[in-house]
Amino acid sequence: MSGLAALIMSKRPFLTAAQVAEQIKSTADPVSQAGPNWAGAGRINMAKALKPGFRLGSPGTARD
């Protein structure tokens, strides 16, 4: 989770820690009660958490 939080904060440094945590929890995929999950929110979904407003790169583009 810390890696995802760092990615979110790198693009949106104005967010508070609570807002970053809420972004991660609100975009988590639900899992069954039998499986482990983070803070009861489900399995972290990086793709959902980084949308909208994040671009991880697209084919044919150069990045610094």
Image (cartoon, rainbow, N blue to C red):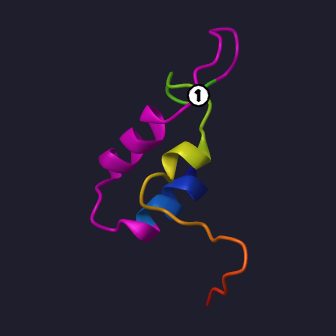
12 w.r.t. 33: above or below: below
State left or right for residue 19 relative to residue 28. Answer: left
Residue 5 lies, in percent from the top left, at 49, 55
Q: Is 59 above or below relative to 21?
A: below
31 magenta-colored: yes
| Tally of numbered discs | 1
Q: x, y (%) of residue 11?
A: 42, 68
Q: Element under label 1?
A: loop
Residue visible at 37% across and 39% down in the picture: 22
Looking at this view, name the residue that lies furthest to the bottom.
64
Residue that sits furthest to the front in the current view? 60
At horizontal 72% and vertical 72% (from top left) the residue drawn is 59
Q: Quadrant of residue 4?
A: bottom right
Q: Nearer the viewer, residue 42 or 54?
A: 54
Instruction: Give the residue type at disc 1.
Output: Asp
Q: Is residue 62 above or below residue 22?
A: below
In percent of width and height, residue 9 lies at 42, 63
Image quadrant in which you'd find residue 58: bottom right
Segment tinted magenta in the rendering: 10-36
Count neighbours of disc 1 (C-alpha within 10 A) and say few if under 14, some if 14 to 19, many if 20 or more: some
Residue 13 as seen in the image, left or right of residue 55: left
Q: Which residue is mark 1?
A: 29
Query: Is 54 left, or right, of 34 in this rendering?
Result: left
